[in-house]
Amino acid sequence: MSLDPRLALAWGLVLLFSMPSCAPEHQLTREQALDPQSCAGCHPRAVDEWEGSMHAYASNDPVFRALVAKGQEDTDGALGGLCVTCHAPLALQTGATEDGLNLADVDPALQGVTCAACHLAESVDGLNNNQITLANDSVMRGAWKNPKATPAHDSVYSPSLDRRTPEGSALCGSCHDVVLPNGLHIEQTYLEWSESVFASSPNQQLGCGQCHMRGRDGFGADVPGAPARQLHDHSMPGMDVALTDWPRREEQRAAVQRSLDVTLEARLDARAGPGGLLFDYTLENVGSGHGFPSGAAHNRRVWVEIEAYRDGELVYSNGVAGEGAVLDLDDPDVWVMRDIIYDADGQEVKHTWEATSMDKVQLQPGLTADPTDPAYVHSVTRSYLVPGDTPDLVLARTKMRPFGLDLMGPLVDDGYLDAAAAAAMPTFELASTVKEWRPESR
């Protein structure tokens, strides 16, 4: 994609006459290179986007800190650095923390997944648990094959930072897949993507960054003479959101909502059933390059709500949780999508450190572009019987919470989590899944 010459000229004039030089007259030291604020002078937009991202929030998240505290207590410290290896990699690697229990006292420059945690990546040595080797220098790796010399730091091209390459997805996958010490592959986002049509089809290849770091035209740095580039967004929306006061909090939620609104396709159909009408609600994962939900999917809650009305009166409902926890509903037929984890005795458990096995209840991504392949159809349908006379109106929708209220309540009760943070957990309604049926639509 080329930059409009008129835009390039306008930006060039702005840079030449109104932008002071921000680059230091010497190269950044190693310590400076680890601090995102060292990047902000020349790359203010990227840092501003990152500061509002869940990567920046990763070790500041009160739910994460609550889980670390509970996990270390429950395991008598055996949890070790498992969680912070991805949520605060530089804090762990520099020795600022060993187990995440002192994150409140760690230098902000080392909190979360920082600029250096990606742009100093020298190699990806494994596809789980942050098996990334960071270079012991201040050379910034990036996606541009012709980096411009700068007094602030040396720059080199790296396919691991190029969102158009398989190596770029592997860099993401190294933290977005997690394997427990007992061998359970408890988070599988990269694995799900690698088995999908988005990784395997030459005509439909889409890497992690091509969805989560959308491109735009701009300039590599806010300095005179900076060349026009194809940039990428560093806000990286997914499913999680900030629950406390945080930069760009509302923008991040809006970005998550926009992404969710085009992730699934839905259909609502009616047919005769025993003593009433059966309503078939079909969901298909069309917009996610991995399963849905994904990530720490044992913490996610995605569910379906169905309501039927006759003469304006509610005569049937299923999955309507309101402000409560969907798993607290006294209805075994509620369609909830999540990972269900079990201990060694086969009993369902709540937390990562308790798990030895799991069942995945999710919507698969597309696995093939060949319509003759049985795997081509990956939609899922559930049926709901509305007994009695034909209803006037049936409504169906899919909702999502990034973290289940049934998990947050005990964390609050046990003193690990502030009630205000729990109360801030949003419920997203996926716009593309909201469907209605009326008798005239038969």
Image (cartoon, rainbow, N blue to C red):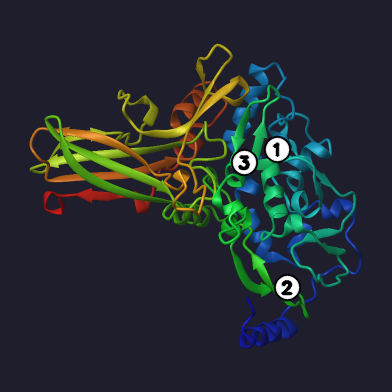
Crowding around mark 3 (Cα neighbors within 10 Å: few <14, some 14 to 19, many 20+) is some
For the residue pair 240 and 377, the one nearer the viewer reads as: 377
CA–CA distance in space, label 3 to label 2 = 37 Å
Label 1 near label 2: C-beta < 8 Å? no
Q: Position of residue 306 (x, y in %)?
A: 26, 39
Q: Of tags 3 and 2, which is closer to the observer? A: 3
Label 2 near label 3: C-beta < 8 Å? no
- Which residue is the site of mark 3? 191
CA–CA distance in space, label 1 to label 3 = 10 Å
Measuring 30% from the left and 25% from the top, which residue is drawn there? 331
CA–CA distance in space, label 2 to label 1 = 35 Å
Q: Of tags 1 and 3, which is closer to the observer? A: 3
For the residue pair 265 and 101, the one nearer the viewer reads as: 265
Residue at the top extreme of this rendering: 345
Left or right position of 128 against 389? right
Q: Position of residue 66 (x, y in %)?
A: 60, 29
Quarter placement of the N terminus: bottom right
Report which quarter residue 21 is drawn in: bottom right
Q: Name the residue type under label 2.
A: Asp
Measuring 73% from the left and 71% from the top, which residue is drawn there? 220
- Which residue is the site of mark 2? 222
- Which residue is the site of mark 1? 128
Measuring 62% from the left and 41% from the top, which residue is drawn there? 191
Measuring 76% from the left and 45% from the top, which residue is drawn there? 110
Crowding around mark 1 (Cα neighbors within 10 Å: few <14, some 14 to 19, many 20+) is many
Q: Which sits earlier in the primary sequence, circle 2 or circle 1?
A: 1
